[in-house]
Image (cartoon, rainbow, N blue to C red):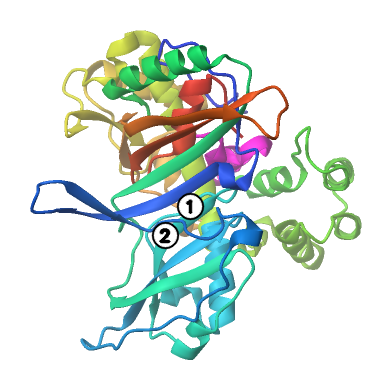
Amino acid sequence: MIDEIPTIFITKTTALKARVKQRYSDFIVEEIYESTIEQNENLIEKKCSVQRFNIPFEQRKPFEKMIIPTNENNKEHLVLELEKINTDTNKAIAMLARGLGLSTKRIGYGGLKDKRAITCQRISVFDPPLEKIINFGAKGLELRNPVWGERIELGDLKENYFTIILRDISASEDEIKNIINDFSKQIVNGIPNFFGTQRFGGKRMITHKIGKLLIKEKYKDAIIAYLTETFEEEKEDIKSARINLAKTLDFKKALREFPSECRTELAILNHLVRKENDFMGALNALPKKTRYLFVHAYQSYIFNKIIKKRLEEFGDKALQPIGEEKTSNGIPLVILAGFETKYSPGRIGEIEKQILEEENVCFEDFKVRALSELSSKGSEKEIALFPKNFLLKRIFEDDFNEGKKAIEIEFSLSKGNYATTVLKELIKEEIF
């Protein structure tokens, strides 16, 4: 139905073969939320800095009791920094809401942060239970630096700052320096803003496939695919349960075979045991955000195919405006297809039409009449991203891969863009 995730590399540097995210602490994300100009005209960036989980356990200071300032201006929201390790943002927010005894709707955040990483970001809590916040504790989470302010909404950040360690490198120190030096010069002109494999479900590569089935209103096919598609490295008990279900479609038996960690699959199966052919209803076992992310993943897949086609046809000029297409700050905008999307003028519009015809979809398909919550008007996204302040901080012996080297790099990206897109361009292979 859908071929592999399309990608292509624009930089001409030698691939720096390396291992990404071998350890949680190899990937640090810090949210930059404001910039100010000091009197000496230096730009000072305000960010949520990682302070705890990147320090060895035996060297960490005990948690300090939080002191919440007086709410002199009668603000409704308490703004805090949330540092987390090996936990995605949605799970962290759910843990926090459960610990504070309130709805997740009362907690605001500016962006989703990586799971396999140490990250720090701002959050806000409406009408906060102060004593519970002061005493909050959960493994892998820390709250600090409370101030009274406004609700934090998605997009309420400026950039993300990344500190990343790449490991298992066989190249010599001189080769590493040359590759990084050349790479940092070439990315000044931008790199293709591909969505990474995380958008498509990581190694399982399923979310965009489900998204296409949903906009085509093939609910049974979507549910069965979600339950049964597997991948080579999946745990054997989960893989076996999926394979058996694909053969038998015996939902009662599958309930016994899927392990307890497969909570979403079990919720779907429970519904199908009660209402055997209610595949549309079974979708409600999935969180609303997850259901919509399937459609967004398919939009992202089409976006990637359009960029790849442009690169194949226009080469180095693909990231520049072609004809009279729409731009933002001089950067071409690529469609995220939806029911209000219009084709671009000229050759770019022809490329868009070709891709949609290859997929056997049209813009109107994104208006899902039976389940309107899956509908999408569509939007646009810049074709290129521009890493800022790309820096090789150090080269050192890799303690976790004998005889190999590791490097530490830093850079920042504007909101909504992914560090793995930059790393993929550097190592010249997909990152899962």
Frontmost residue, 42 versus 275: 42
Q: Amino acid at mark 2?
A: Gln
Q: Quadrant of the C terminus?
A: top right
Q: Which residue is mark 1?
A: 113
Placement of 261 over or under 416, stated as above or below: below
Instruction: Kindly indicate the quadrant of the structure image that contains residue 300.
Output: top left
Instruction: Kindly indicate the quadrant of the structure image that contains residue 230.
Output: top right
What residue sits 38% from the left and 14% below the top? 182
Frontmost residue, 299 versus 28: 28
Asked if the stretch drawn in magenta spans residue 206, the answer is yes
Evaluate if marks 1 and 2 touch, with contact meaning CB atoms under 8 Å apart: yes
Q: Which residue is mark 2?
A: 121
Secondary structure under the numbered disc 2 in the rendered image: strand
Placement of 40 over or under 167, stated as above or below: below
Q: Position of residue 342 (x, y in %)?
A: 28, 34
Placement of 24 over or under 74, stated as above or below: above
Q: Position of residue 306 (x, y in %)?
A: 40, 24
Q: Amino acid at mark 1?
A: Lys
The residue range painted magenta reads 195-217
Chain-order first, disc 1 or disc 2: 1
How would you rate the neighbour count of disc 2 (Cα within 10 Å): few for under 14, some for 14-19, many for 20 or more? many
Residue 287 makes an appearance in the image: no
